[in-house]
Each structure stands twice: as C-alpha cells, then as structure tokens.
Amino acid sequence: MSRVASPSAAAAPALASRAAASGAAPPVVELQQVKRVYYKPDGTVLVEALKGVSVAIRKGEYVAIMGSSGSGKSTMMNVLGCLDRPTSGKYLLDGQDCAVMNDEDLSRYRGRKIGFVFQAFNLIPELNIRENVEVPLFYQGVTPSERHRRAVESLSLVGLGDRLGHRPSELSGGQQQRTAIARALVTQPAVLMADEPTGNLDSTTGKAVLELFENLHRQGMTIIMVTHDPEIGRRAHRVIRLRDGLVESDVYNAHAIEPEA
Ligand SMILES: Nc1ncnc2c1ncn2[C@@H]1O[C@H](COP(=O)(O)OP(=O)(O)OP(=O)(O)O)[C@@H](O)[C@H]1O
Ligand SMILES: [Mg+2]
C-alpha cells in the first residue's frame, strides 16, 4: 500500500499530518518547474531532458528516484546536487535560490549543504582514505588537526576506522563506496545525494552499503538516491518516478522506515 505524495484530495489529510509532525519545516530541496535542455553546438535543441519538474523534499525523507534509462534521473540529480544548473525554473536548496548565486558562491554553498556519492566512487588514487575524506574539509579551510579528527570520525562511522592508511586500490568496492560515503558525510551536510551508489557493486556488497544509508536515515539524515533497484524502491520512504523528463508518479511507501522527528 502506498499513498500519493503530490497534492490530491485522497492524500491531503496524510500530508497535512506529516507537515504538522515535521513542524512544517521548509523543504530541504525544492524544484519548481525545472527544465534542462541539452543543445547542439549550433544552438538547436538536442534533448529536453527535464520538461518541467516540480518536487519538494523535506528534512528526514529517504527518497528514491526511479525510471527507465534516459528518463532524466541523472540530469535531475545533477541539478539537485548543484553540479548543473536548470535551463529554466527554480531550484531552492535549504531555502536559498541557487539560480542567483555565481559559480563560486554556489560551489561553496553546495559544499556546506550537500554530500554527493557517485556510482564510480571518484576517490583520489594517490591519497589514502583518510586523506580522501579530508579533501572537502580542506576546501572549507578547516585546520589540519580538525580535518584529521573529523575524517577519522567519519570513517569510523562507516566501519573503516581500521583502514585509515589504505589507498582506494587496496580496498574492496564496498569499502571504496563506504569511503565515498564518509567523504560525503564529513562536512555534516543537510542532505546526502547518491546516483546509483550500488551500481558498481555486487549484490551482497551493495546490500551492506544500502544498510549504511538506511542507518543514516534512521539517525535523521535526508537521503535522495537514484536507483534502478526495485528493492530499494520498496524500502525507501518515498519513490519519485520519472518518465521522459517528467514526474510520472510520486508516492510514499506505507511500510517504509519513518524518519525520526
Ligand atoms: N550531456 C548531455 N548532452 C546531451 N544529452 C544528454 C546529456 N546528458 C544526458 N542527455 C540526454 O538526456 C536524457 C536524460 O539523460 P539522463 O542521463 O538524465 O538519464 P537517466 O535517467 O539518468 O538514465 P540512466 O538510467 O541510463 O542513467 C537522455 O535522453 C540523454 O541522452
Ligand atoms: Mg543516470
């Protein structure tokens, strides 16, 4: 059983009580009629990858973004993660309009608000995992001793406190992805975003990584994850399904883990 997250007569009472329970906090992320068009070199339209997507996600939600290949999931995630800007429409991240920020301000704001986990881990091979996790703190001007302390803390949280001196190539795929999650968490972001974080992992390792995401969600972390995995879709709190650049459906799973108040 599930209920619809977009406004409808049937869903209104459930949504009202949810908003009341959360103290009607403003959304952590909000897309308003977002379009993203890819152009050809001659300026003509190549693909309209997002055709007007409006979505609001609140603190503590665990959202899976699903849909067939080419439906616009990564494009949407890249906008949410401030890796890309909408062609038109508005993106509010923790209440701030990202469209009006210049590149430098946006990149600084992104660093404070978002932890991003990539399918391909994106770790720096020459650095050990503690140094990898310290990188975002370096860009925030955190002192070396504080960087060290927070990186160790974050790696311990994902169960890698005994691998601090290892380079990524000396770790399993699951351990590399857990390192990437530690790196995303070390800045204490408002929202953790991941594009197919288990896509490069075998099913057992992928399951362990997902359990880590679920634990973080139970502790109150807001999580937005692109996935093809129907099992994640069942376990997430809410599933937004894209089709051909538009939101096809947006539903809460009745049996999903509820966020802590
Ligand atoms: N850089 C780009 N230039 C031109 N077109 C692009 C670009 N990136 C994506 N597209 C197009 O935009 C559409 C949406 O792509 P997107 O990568 O968002 O899909 P997706 O849902 O993430 O797919 P998948 O499940 O295969 O990862 C597709 O038609 C794709 O070909
Ligand atoms: Mg994709």
Image (cartoon, rainbow, N blue to C red):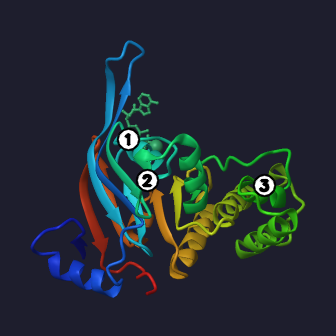
- The C terminus, quarter of image: bottom left
Report the disc number at residue 86.
1
Residue type at mark 1: give it: Pro
Of labels 3 and 1, the one closer to you? 1
Circle 1 Cα neighbour tier, 10 Å, few/some/many (<14 / 14–19 / ≥20): many
In this view of the protein, which residue sits in the foreground, 54 or 237? 54
Which quadrant holds residue 147? bottom right
Among the two numbered marks 1 and 2 on one chain, the one whose residue lies closer to the N terminus? 1
Q: Position of residue 99 (x, y in %)?
A: 41, 45
Q: Residue 55 vs residue 103: left or right?
A: left
Q: Position of residue 72 (x, y in %)?
A: 36, 42
Instruction: Name the residue: 33% across, 87% down.
Output: 21
Among the two numbered marks 3 and 1 on one chain, the one whose residue lies closer to the N terminus? 1
- Callout 3: CB less than 8 Å from ligand 2: no
- Callout 2: CB less than 8 Å from ligand 1: yes
Which quadrant holds residue 160? bottom right
In this view of the protein, which residue sits in the foreground, 216 or 138? 138
Rendered view: 64 above or below 243: below
- Residue occupying the far left of the picture: 9
Q: Is residue 198 visible?
A: no
Residue type at mark 2: give it: His
Q: Residue 158 vs residue 208: left or right?
A: right
Q: Position of residue 48 (x, y in %)?
A: 30, 32
- Callout 1: CB less than 8 Å from ligand 1: no
Among the two numbered marks 2 and 3 on one chain, the one whose residue lies closer to the N terminus? 3
Q: Which residue is mark 2?
A: 228
Report the disc number at residue 132.
3
Instruction: Name the residue: 29% across, 82% down.
Output: 18
Q: Residue 44 vs residue 76: left or right?
A: left
- The N terminus, quarter of image: bottom left
Distance CA(mark 3)–CA(mark 1): 30 Å
Q: Check disc 2 and report its element: helix, strand or loop.
A: loop
